[in-house]
């Protein structure tokens, strides 16, 4: 249940939730790809991005005092993850890159950037 002040953050909360899910799904797919060694950076940023998005959801849900700053950093991490995923042509990486870009945009909106 969201507080009244957290309801204004709902679009960003939803974007962060979708992004975290896409990152975890992509992570699982990437570790099962035959070229895993070439994906080390991608696998690493996927987990970082998913965890950051989950934390952003928590911060916004409780209307935390550092939500805007947290979302600004989340946007940077999502941008980095999208860039990394975009280097691979498989469907899971492309879908993840798309979710990361959407999340980064919503996080920038939330942060007032």
Image (spheres, rainbow, N blue to C red):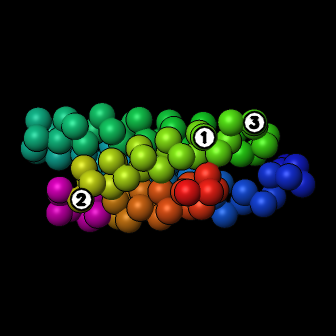
Q: Is residue 6 above or below residue 58?
A: below
Name the residue located 17 percent from the left edge and 46 percent from the top edge. Answer: 33
Mark 3, residue position = 65
Provide the residue designation for mark 1.
69
Decide whether residue 92 is among the magenta residues.
Answer: yes
Q: Earlier in the sequence, mark 2 or mark 1?
A: 1
Q: Quadrant of residue 40?
A: top left
The location of residue 78, given as percent across then percent down, is: 42, 50
Q: Give the CA distance from mark 2 to mark 3.
A: 33 Å
Q: Would you say 76 lies left or right of 9 here?
A: left
Q: Residue at x 34, y 48 (%)?
A: 81
Residue span colored magenta = 87-94
Residue 25 in view here: no
Label 3 environment density (alpha carbons within 10 Å; few <14, some 14–19, many ≥20): few
**Residue 48 on the magenta segment:** no
Q: Is residue 69 visible?
A: yes
């Amino acid at each position: 249940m969201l507080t009244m002040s957290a309801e204004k953050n709902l679009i960003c909360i939803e974007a962060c939730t979708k992004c975290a899910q896409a990152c975890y799904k992509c992570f699982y797919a990437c570790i099962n790809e035959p070229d895993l060694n070439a994906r080390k950076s991608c696998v690493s940023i996927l987990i970082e991005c998913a965890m950051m998005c989950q934390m952003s959801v928590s911060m916004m849900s409780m209307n935390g005092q550092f939500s805007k700053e947290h979302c600004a950093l989340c946007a940077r991490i999502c941008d980095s993850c999208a860039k990394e995923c975009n280097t691979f042509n498989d469907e899971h990486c492309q879908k993840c890159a798309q979710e990361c870009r959407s999340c980064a945009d919503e996080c920038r909106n939330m942060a007032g950037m």
